[in-house]
Image (tube, rainbow, N blue to C red):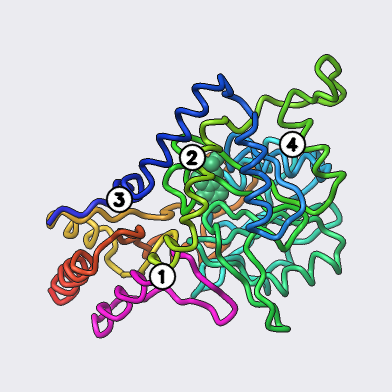
Amino acid sequence: MKIPFLDLSQQIKEAKKDFNAAFNKTVKNYDFILGEEVALFEKEFAQYCHKKFAVGVNSGTDALFLGLLSLRVGPGDEVIVPTFTYIATALAVSYTGAKPVFVDINERTYNIDPGKIKAAITNRTKAIIPVHLYGQPADMQPILKIAKAYNLKAIEDTAQAHGAKYKMPNGKWEIAGSMTDIGAFSFYPTKNLGAFGDGGMCLTDDEGIYKKLLMLRDYGRRSRYEHITLGYNSRLDTIQAAVLRVKLKHLDKWNALRRRNAKIYLRELQGIKGLIFPLEAGYAYHVYHVFAIRVKNRDRVIEELAKKGIRALIHYPIPLHLQEVYKDLGYKKGDFPVAERIAKEILSLPMYPHLKETQIKFITSVLKDIMDK
Ligand SMILES: Cc1ncc(COP(=O)(O)O)c(C=O)c1O
């Protein structure tokens, strides 16, 4: 049985009529950049996340980058970032001229360890970027407390967690991307809410930040011919917004299917020796963008799975403090032992809403054979 890491064909089939109508409308109106569909999607996505303002941009990386700029992060500043995330989280900091300062992660959730943040704060620290990795919110309550105590700005990197939720100590569930100054989202095609190309979005409740973001994404423009700040060309395409409007209607259902699949995996993986399963923290509604397990002999397991037609990937094999691009920051092996160990053991199994129970059972039975060997 061949099982790809991700298969979007069923998603596309399910909403094909709506996609076709969205394409036709966009082409008929010659409405290709920003435009009505972008405004409508911004409104709908802001409503979905209970935020006042939304600004569509051309990628998740730019949502972080422009978000940081709107918070006045720049040269001389430091921004705290988990070392175990996709490189874009840190690159966005570097683009502003600020310095990413890495922090180790929690051993079971793989998100930034709130207990290790204070030690990374200096008088240059301006902001913190918690990442909701794999679809599970970072432990936001202690992070928000630290941000408040040290007067830090915060941006949630929500690229992998559309529709995830975090339970505050008072029992109230907050949607990922809504708890800080800015929520930054990616709509890269593989994401839980993915376009048919690149796309991203910033959410905020602050009208001043909103107005700045509108300028930053559109050449620093105040009016058609007046440019008052160093802006960029980072706009969401109309066609992508039209696709995303269709998909947003399915997001909760597709996330629920991911959660069902995670449940099946967890049931079927019980009893297999040498595996560490993903953990849904008590405060989390996990949306399983990635279903990651840990094994000691990771590379051999991936090879053996591939021999049986199962495609597994690694998110991520190299923590950011050990990436060549950041060698000048002076970090070394051993600085963040939890992330370094997990980067050697982590393995992502196929996960998407329409993955079938029979496919999951096949994957877990192959995995059992490999681990029993
Ligand atoms: C955690 C994280 N942050 C940021 C990004 C960047 O998003 P994009 O690829 O849309 O620029 C991604 C995805 O690629 C991501 O997974």
The residue identified by callout 4 is 97
Question: Residue placed at 33% from the left, 48% from the top?
Answer: 8
- Determine the CA span between mark 2 and mark 3: 15 Å
| Highlighted range, magenta | 259-288
Mark 1 neighbour density, 10 Å: few (under 14) some (14–19) many (20 or more): many
Q: Is residue 103 left or right of residue 319?
A: right
| Quadrant including the N terminus | bottom left
Question: Residue placed at 64% from the left, 29% from the top?
Answer: 34
The residue identified by callout 1 is 259
- Determine the CA span between mark 3 and mark 4: 42 Å
Question: Residue placed at 29% from the left, 81% from the top?
Answer: 267
Q: Position of residue 298 (x, y in %)?
A: 29, 62
Q: Are marks 2 and 3 in contact (CB under 8 Å)?
A: no
Mark 3 neighbour density, 10 Å: few (under 14) some (14–19) many (20 or more): few
The residue identified by callout 3 is 10
Q: What's the residue type where badge 3 is placed?
A: Gln
The residue identified by callout 2 is 243
Q: Is residue 251 above or below residue 69?
A: below
* SS state under label 3: helix
* SS state under label 1: helix
| Quadrant including the C terminus | bottom left
Question: Residue placed at 64% from the left, 32% from the top?
Answer: 36
Q: Earlier in the sequence, mark 3 or mark 1?
A: 3
Q: What's the residue type where badge 4 is placed?
A: Gly
